[in-house]
Image (cartoon, helix red, strand yellow):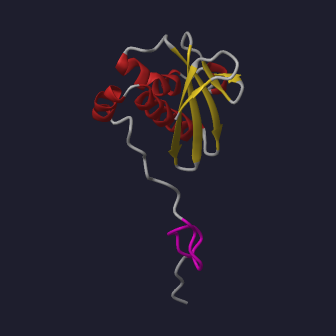
Amino acid sequence: MVVADSNSGRAVYWGTGRRKSAVARVRLVPGEGKLTVNGKDGELYFQFNANYLGVIKNPLETLGLENEYDILVKAEGGGLTGQADSIRLGVARALCQLDPDNRPPLKTEGYLTRDPRAKERKKYGLHKARKAPQYSKR
């Protein structure tokens, strides 16, 4: 979804990413490459972990746009890994909104694939989803 920012009239590109129980609503705004997550600086939010920050910026680096867009994120649920991966998916989807020609390189890198793995629900009579009580012969 492309929306003009009410304050400055700049184009804003939206993308939603999900992984496990994490959901990230991502906005790409023309800027100088800053990452803001839930109102905090992205490096501070992800505890200066280069892995998480690299995962998030991968789609932009693939297209050579690292320093051209600011990433504004509202992330909920899950842990830092799930949130980082959901932000990556949201950024990739927003880049597809920006220009449909961005889709093939992002698709070949696997950035547009939603990871469907999630926690399995607990079943009755079991301790966890699959862990059964210990069997006792006597």
Which residue is depicted at the point 69% across and 30% down?
Answer: 38
Q: Is residue 88 above or below residue 54?
A: below
Image x and y of residue 22, in percent: 58, 45
| Residue 34 image-quadrant placement | top right
Image x and y of residue 130, in percent: 50, 69
Q: Magenta stretch mostly in which secondary structure?
A: loop
Image x and y of residue 78, in percent: 61, 45
Which residue is depicted at the point 57% across and 32% down?
Answer: 26
Number of numbered callouts drawn:
0
**What is the span of residues highlighted in magenta in the rendered image?**
121-133
Q: Is residue 66 magenta?
A: no
| Residue 125 image-quadrant placement | bottom right
Which residue is depicted at the point 64% across and 23% down?
Answer: 5
Which residue is depicted at the point 70% across and 23% down?
Answer: 40
Is residue 43 rendered to the left or right of residue 39? left
In this view, the residue in front, 104 or 89, is 104
In this view, the residue in front, 68 or 19, is 68
| Residue 58 image-quadrant placement | top left
Q: Is residue 22 above or below residue 118?
A: above
Q: Is residue 130 magenta?
A: yes
Image x and y of residue 99, in percent: 39, 25
Is residue 121 rendered to the left or right of residue 55? right
Is residue 12 rendered to the left or right of residue 99? right
Quadrant where the C terminus sits is bottom right
In this view, the residue in front, 106 or 121, is 106
